[in-house]
Image: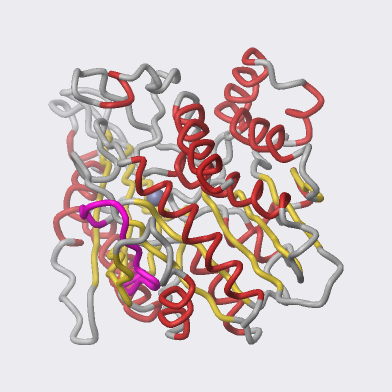
Amino acid sequence: MLKELKHFAVQTRRKFHTFPEVGFTEFITTFEIYQMLQNLSFHLYIGKEIMDSDERFGVPKVEEIEASKARAIAYGVPEAFAEKLDGGHTGVIAVLDTGRKGPHIAMRYDIDGLPIIESDEAGHVPADKGFQSQHPKEMHACGHDGHISIGLAVAKYLDKHKDELTGKFTMIFQPAEEGLRGANSIVQKGWLDNVDYFMSGHLGIHALQAGSVAATAEQILASTKFDVTFKGKSAHAGVEPNEGRNALNAAATALLQLQAIPRHRDGTTRINVGHLSGGSGRNVIADKAVMMAETRGETTALNQYMYQEAERIIQASAAMYNVKASISFMGQGLGSVCDAEWVAIVKDACKNNPDVTKVFDMLPLQASEDASYMMDHVQKSGGIATYMIFPSPLPVGHHHPQFDIDEAAIRTAVSVYIDVINYLQHR
Ligand SMILES: [Zn+2]
C-alpha cells in the first residue's frame, strides 16, 4: 500500500508540474485536486466556502484571473466548476470525520506556482522526462507540485484506513502561498478552529540527500510584501524641467536608502526591492514609478521594525522630490515558532521508518510562510503546530528556472506524514 502511494505521489507530482498556476488563479490545479479526492470519503469544500474573500491578500487583477479561468475551461475544466472559483476563490479543503473520538489533525499543502519561465535545457529533469510546464510563463519552481501530491497520497491513505482511524482530519490545499496571500483568508473562515495538531512543511530548502526530515523549522521569518507607486508630474526635459516632479528619482532614491535601514540587535532582518520600473521616455520627466518590495524579520516585531522604517524612507524620498508615494499592501506572514513537542513526536513516529535516514530536531527555514497564520491560530487555541522540512539535493536554488526536486524526498514526506498521523492516534 505504502509503496503504491509513494509511486502515486511521484506520478501525480509530474502531472501537476505540467500546469502550474500562480496564486488565486489555480483553476486547473483546484479541479484536478477535486477530481482525485471526489471518490474518497471526504467532504469537499471549494470556492467561498473555504475562504473569507476580503481577508485574502494581493488578489491579482480581474483580467489575470479571467484569463486563467478561460485557459482552464479550454483545458477541460467544466464551466460550472470554474464558476464556483470565480474571482480567484481557488483551493480545496477536504474533511474526513471518522465519527470516533480522537484528535483533530489539520494539514496544509500549498498548491501555487510562480511567474517563472521553466528551462528547457538538457539536464533539467522535467524537460528531459517530458513533464515540463505547458504554461509559457508559469512554473512550479518551489516544489508545491510535490506538496500537492504528498497531500493527495496522504488523503488516499486516510480514506483507505477510515474504519480504523479516530478523530477528524482537515486537509487544506491552499492557494497563493507565494507572496503570503492565501492562508489568512482560510484561518478567518474558521477552518483552523479546534485543531489539536497542525502540520505543514516544505520539500527542499536544504540541499541534502533525500531521506531526512526536520521535525521542526526555525527562522520562519515574518514578512510584509508591498507595492509602491510614486506619482509625480511629467514635463519636457529640455524646455521646462523645473515644471516636472520626477517620480523616477524619488523611487531610485528610496531604493538605495531602503538598503540603509540599520540591522537590529534582536535578530535577523531582510529587505528587498525586486522590481522597479518607471518613466516613459528619454526626454520626459518621469511622472510615475512602481516598486515591488518586501521586508522580513525573525520575529513579527522585527519585521514591523523593518516595515515601519521602509515606510518612513519611502515617504521621505517622495517628499524630497515633491512627488506622492502610495503603498499597497500585498501579502504578509508572521514570525513563527514550532512547538518543541514535535521533535519527540516525529522521532518516535519514524523510528522504524525505512524511508527516513535521519530526523533533525530543527533546521532553519530562513524564508517566510503564510502557514504561520495557521500555526499561530492553532497555538493560540491550545493545539500544537509544526513546519517540517524534507531536504533534497537541489541542482539550483528555489525560484530558479531549473529548479527541481529529488522525487525520493516526496516519498519520504508521504511516509513521514503517515507515520506521524498514526502516532498521533495513540498519543
Ligand atoms: Zn515554497
- The correct choice, above or below, for 76 with respect to 302 in the image is above
Image quarter in which the C terminus is found: bottom right
Residue stretch in magenta: 206-221
In percent of width and height, residue 43 lies at: 81, 50
Which residue is at the far right? 99
- The correct choice, above or below, for 165 with respect to 412 in the image is below
Residue 347 at least partly seen: yes
At 41% from the left and 76% from the top, the residue drawn is: 347
Q: Nearer the viewer, residue 327 or 391?
A: 391
- The correct choice, above or below, for 375 with respect to 265 in the image is above
Q: Would residue 59 be counted in the magenta stretch? A: no
In percent of width and height, residue 132 lies at: 37, 22
Q: Nearer the viewer, residue 33 or 361?
A: 361
In percent of width and height, residue 107 lies at: 59, 61
At 54% from the left and 52% from the top, the residue drawn is: 109
Residue 329 at least partly seen: no
In percent of width and height, residue 2 lies at: 54, 48
At 49% from the left and 31% from the top, the residue drawn is: 11
Q: Nearer the viewer, residue 108 or 236?
A: 108
